[in-house]
Structure formats: structure tokens, C-alpha cells
Image: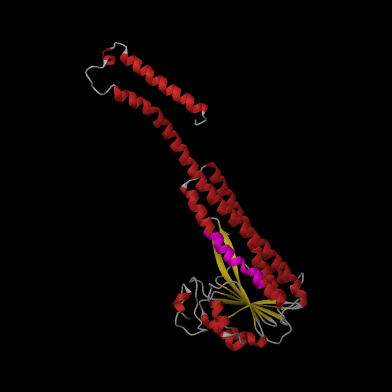
Amino acid sequence: MTKSLSSASGKTGLPPGSLVHVGKVRDTASRVSVIRYNKEDVETINIASLDELQRDRGKAEITWVNIEGLQDTEIIASLEHGFAIHPLVLEDILNTHQRPKFEEFADYLFVVLKALAFEPDQPTINHEQISILILKDFVFTFTEKPDDLFDPIRRRLEDGKGRLRCLGADYLAYVIMDTVVDRYFTLQDSLDEVLETLEEQLLSNPTSETLASIQRFKRELIFVRKSISPLRELLSGIQRSESDLIHEKTGVYFRDVYDHAIRVTEAVDSSRDLISGMLDIYLSSVSNKMNEVMKVLTIFASIFIPLTFVAGIYGMNFEYMPELKWRWGYPLLWVVFIGITIGLLNYFRRKKWL
């Protein structure tokens, strides 16, 4: 087992095809589960080594091998000798910072996807790289950790209804990809709820925490778009592929996944536009609040300027100022002060400055 690296920069200087796990280190050990099925039967087993699969090659059944956890690079390395998988492909499987892509080889196809899930408690978006190898009678899937992503597919296989048990490995690969893409719609619904909450905060009482949430959400959307937008290119490549591993009947289903990918990408783009608009609204709102404060302060200053002027004149302490000897001079001065204040307030109100 090779030590995991947190970033691809740690592989600098290593030769191409070096099998080193790059990504988040998980506490769980790697586990290999196998499902063999045909029209009549389905069997689920756990194996310790991929070498045990060699005896199943050539049988009239489809074998789905799911490898959970990528820390044990020896399991991945055994694919090179047992199934003639290129070392660069194995390197990409272990590097979980891959961009979603599709690569075509003579005897197999390689697909990389990103599974995304929203965690409302954080709130953050958890991501996981899903790698798929499609062979004639085998489908290998590689996940970073154990989860319930493929449980609906397992239930469909056990149920035995529908096309899944009747069609080939390419159809199984389609179902896996469709399951991953369908989760994007759930993610988009969660993002829409967050957007609505932020919009309510923005319109009612925007605070610095609102700005922090908008900025954080904007970064998450950038990552989501980077994970989803390459799907169009990936699925277009699958539809254009002339490989014998993808049958003509299955091409129709991949076009359906392509349509879903376009819908999700457009929804993410709309969310990005909305969050950018919210940022502009927040800045405008803060600016308007500042203008309101400045307006109130300016009104107070405008009222006190003439009062200060009058008080300054009669505070100069000249000896010959007749008003200082008047008996009613002090009350009269208060009348002047109050009159100036009321007059200015009425003037500001007529100008609609208040």
C-alpha cells in the first residue's frame, strides 16, 4: 500500500504511470464487491483479490466489480496484468482530482465522473470521483468511499425486472452514469432552497454574514460547474464512439443522459447568474443604508449649523452688545432656535428629504 498524497503536486518527479493515490485519505479499508448476473440469476460476492475474476471471463454473464476506497494501490495495479489496463488509466483512477472525461481504447472504455451531494448542515458540497471501466463482459467502478450511491442499481438487479438484466455491460455503464447525473437534480433542488433563503435575508436584513454566505455559495457553484460542464463533451464522445463495446440500442439511452446533463448545466449557470445578482444587490443595499445614515447625519448637521452660528455670535464676549442686556434676550434666542429648527424640518419634508 502506497502512501496517499493530498495534491497532485506531490507526484512531481515521478515517472508516468506511477500508481499513487491522490486525494482525501479515508479511514475505511478498500473493499471489492462483485455482482454477476444474467437473465435468469444474480449473485453478489466479496473477493479479496481481482485475480479471482479471471475464472469468470468468457462466461455468458455480466460481471460488475465495485471497488470502494482507493488507498490500496495494489488492487488497482492488478488490473494491468489481469485485464491489460494501461498504467496511465490506472494512474487517473487513483488521482481523484481528475476532470470528468471519456477515453476510448481498443478493448475497453474509461469514464470519469464527479458525484456531488449537498450537506445542509455545513453547508457544503461533498464530491467524490467515480471512475468506470467498460469491458466486453465486465464493468469496473471505483469510488473513494463506501456509500449508498449504487444501492438503487443493486435493487434493480435483484428485482430482475426491466432491461438491466437483459442487456450488456454498456447498458450497465449507462445506468451507473444516469444514477450519478440524476443526483445532480437533487443537488440543484438543494441549491435552489439555499438561494431562496439567501434572497429572503438579502431583502429583509442583509448583514455581513449574508455576504459571507453569498461568497461561500458562489465558490461552491464554481466548483459545481467545473464538475458538471465537461459532461456534455464526455457524453458527446460516447455518442460519437465507434467502439464495439457500445451497442446502437444503448446509444439512445446515452443521449438521454446528455439531455439531463444539459439541463443541469443550464440550471447551474442560472444559479451562478442569480448569486452574482445577489452580490450586486447586497452591495447596493449596503450603499443605500450608508446613504440613509449620511442623509440623517447631514440633516442634523444642517439644523445645527445656523444654531451654532447664532450661539457663536453671542458668545464673543464684546462689551458693547445691547442684546446681552435685554431682559427677554435669552427666551427670544430660544424662540429663534426652535423656529429655525422647525422651519428647516418643514423645508426638508417638502423636498422629500425626510
Query: Which SS does the magenta portion mostly show?
Result: helix
> How does the figure colour the protein chain or chains?
secondary structure
Q: Is residue 92 left or right of residue 233?
A: left
Asked if the magenta segment contains residue 244, the reply would be no
Residue situated furthest top in the rendering: 327
Q: Position of residue 127 (x, y in %)?
A: 55, 66
Residue 302 versus residue 291 in the image, above or below: above
In the rendered image, which quarter is residue 182 located in? bottom right
In the rendered image, which quarter is residue 319 located in? top left
Residue 84 in sight from this viewpoint: yes
Q: Is residue 109 left or right of residue 211?
A: right
Residue situated furthest front in the rendering: 320
Q: Say which of 286 and 225 sits in front.
A: 286
In the rendered image, which quarter is residue 3 located in? bottom left
Q: Is residue 10 left or right of residue 221?
A: left
> In this picture, which residue range is highlighted in magenta?
219-234
Q: Position of residue 241 (x, y in %)?
A: 70, 78
Residue 34 versus residue 326 in the image, above or below: below
Number of disc labels: 0
Residue 48 in sight from this viewpoint: no
Please tell me which residue is depicted at 31% across the width and 24% down the height of the picture.
Answer: 311
Q: Position of residue 15 (x, y in %)?
A: 48, 85
Residue 147 versus residue 302 in the image, above or below: below
Q: Position of residue 18 (x, y in %)?
A: 50, 83
